[in-house]
Image (cartoon, grey):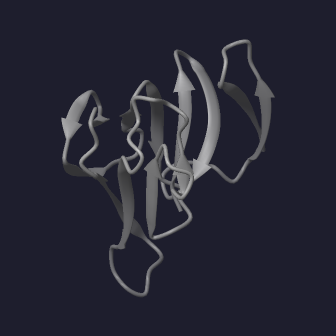
Amino acid sequence: MAALIQFKGNAQGVILRLESLVSRIGRGTENDITIHDELVSKHHAQIEARHVAEPTNMFEYFIEDCGSTNGTFVNDQRIDACQLKNNDVVRFGINHFRFVDDANDDLAATTKIHKTWIPGLYVSTRKK
């Protein structure tokens, strides 16, 4: 499955795996991915994984804004819905994430998380 990788500047942060066919994102705690940011709506957006063709395990990923107040952005463009491609930059409020598709990038490496001096940002280092 794919993942969202939080980043700020050049610092890479938390890796959030998209393990469900539909991953709900927002400020509310009932979401699959909770973002603590007052600019993020309670039910902000969702990412859906759709099978490309059976019986392969390949997916295409689509993001949809759920009527959020401040919008969902992909590569600095406000979207209602669109397909996500590997390395697209997704923004909810002030939080930036890089979309990574496992089929195109190696996320199987061991990841070590380190807290940074920036509040809420963690840096990860990958080990093969």
Where residue 8 sits, quadrant-wise, is top right
Position of residue 87 measured from the top left corner of the image (x, y, whole percent): 42, 39
Where residue 73 sits, quadrant-wise, is top left
| Residue at x 78% of width, y 24% of height | 115
Q: Is 3 on the left or on the right of 62, as rendered?
A: right
> In this view, which residue lies farthest toward the top?
117
| Residue at x 44% of width, y 80% of height | 56
Looking at this view, is 104 or 94 the one in front?
Answer: 94
Looking at this view, is 55 or 49 the one in front?
Answer: 49
Q: Is 93 on the left or on the right of 30, as rendered?
A: left
Position of residue 25 measured from the top left corner of the image (x, y, whole percent): 45, 50
| Residue at x 56% of width, y 64% of height | 19
Q: Is residue 107 above or below residue 117?
A: below
| Residue at x 78% of width, y 34% of height | 113
Q: Is residue 39 above or below residue 126?
A: above
Q: Is 62 on the left or on the right of 26, as rendered?
A: left
Q: Is residue 124 above or below residue 109?
A: above
Looking at this view, is 37 or 115 the one in front?
Answer: 37
Position of residue 82 measured from the top left corner of the image (x, y, whole percent): 22, 51
Position of residue 128 measured from the top left corner of the image (x, y, whole percent): 78, 44
Marks counted in the figure total 0
Looking at this view, is 107 or 95 the one in front?
Answer: 95
